[in-house]
Image (cartoon, rainbow, N blue to C red):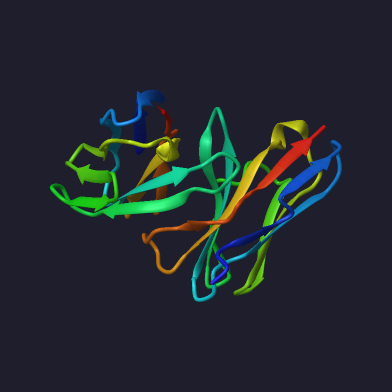
Amino acid sequence: EDQVTQSPEALRLQEGESSSLNCSYTVSGLRGLFWYRQDPGKGPEFLFTLYSAGEEKEKERLKATLTKKESFLHITAPKPEDSATYLCAAYNAGNNRKLIWGLGTSLAVNP
Amino acid sequence: DAGVIQSPRHEVTEMGQEVTLRCKPISGHDYLFWYRQTMMRGLELLIYFNNNVPIDDSGMPEDRFSAKMPNASFSTLKIQPSEPRDSAVYFCASSFEEGYEQYFGPGTRLTVT
């Protein structure tokens, strides 16, 4: 069964304390791994798409990487405004074409 | 572009009442998705459309739920009759092509008492 698991469920960091969020997936026919950011009371906001193992993408303090089994979202020197829930989703291009979503990691960055 | 537009933003209704949620996708996007989000189950895909045609409605929980897309710029999700367990945040999203990034609206927070 297609599945996406994110860890940890919650993470609290001090400002400037770098860390990584994990997204493990078991999806047949993977054709894209997506990262989103969701602020309270808002819809998910698209961050990155990764298509193949070894691919990396960066945006400000965020860098996403992909292997054949998992993806990481690295946060370098985070700021309080990086506090949000980060969601990952894997696109199954097989018979049951849809995005398989993880439950997210809730990140809090303290000043 | 204004992004995906949803209305209403909040809906409080009594059990048994009909609820209609509305969505305007981003212009030029051929795919429209309806999701439900809860703390326990996260984001669940309910149904999606391609060029106004429903493609996969396997996520619609019961016959009480129905969705329509009469044209490229408008879709509705209807719950009739509503039940307390339908309380959740409902999101509409659209994308340019299948498998591409989806852009989400602000959501409708539904509370059924």
User: B60 and B42: which one is in front?
Assistant: B42
In this rendering, the count of numbered labels is: 0
Give the quarter of the image for residue A40.
top right
Image quarter in which the N terminus of chain A is found: top left
Left or right: B22 with respect to A30? right
User: B64 and B19: which one is in front?
Assistant: B19
Left or right: A75 with respect to B4? left
- Residue farthest toward the left in the current orientation of the protein: A54
Image point 48% across, 43% down: which residue?
A38
Image quarter in which the C terminus of chain A is found: top left
User: B52 and A109: which one is in front?
Assistant: A109
Q: Is residue A59 above or below residue B96?
A: above
Residue A59 in the image: state x and y as whole percent: 29, 52
Residue A74 in the image: state x and y as whole percent: 25, 38
Give the quarter of the image for residue B33.
bottom right
Q: Is residue B16 above or below residue A29?
A: above
Residue B15 in the image: state x and y as whole percent: 84, 36
Q: From this viewpoint, is residue A85 visible?
A: no
Image point 71% across, 31% down: which residue?
B85
Give the quarter of the image for residue B97.
bottom left
Q: Is residue A40 above or below residue B7?
A: above
Q: From this viewpoint, is residue A41 visible?
A: yes
Image point 36% across, 59% down: which residue?
B99
Residue B91 in the image: state x and y as whole percent: 59, 50
Image point 44% across, 40% down: which residue?
A81
Left or right: A85 with respect to A91? right
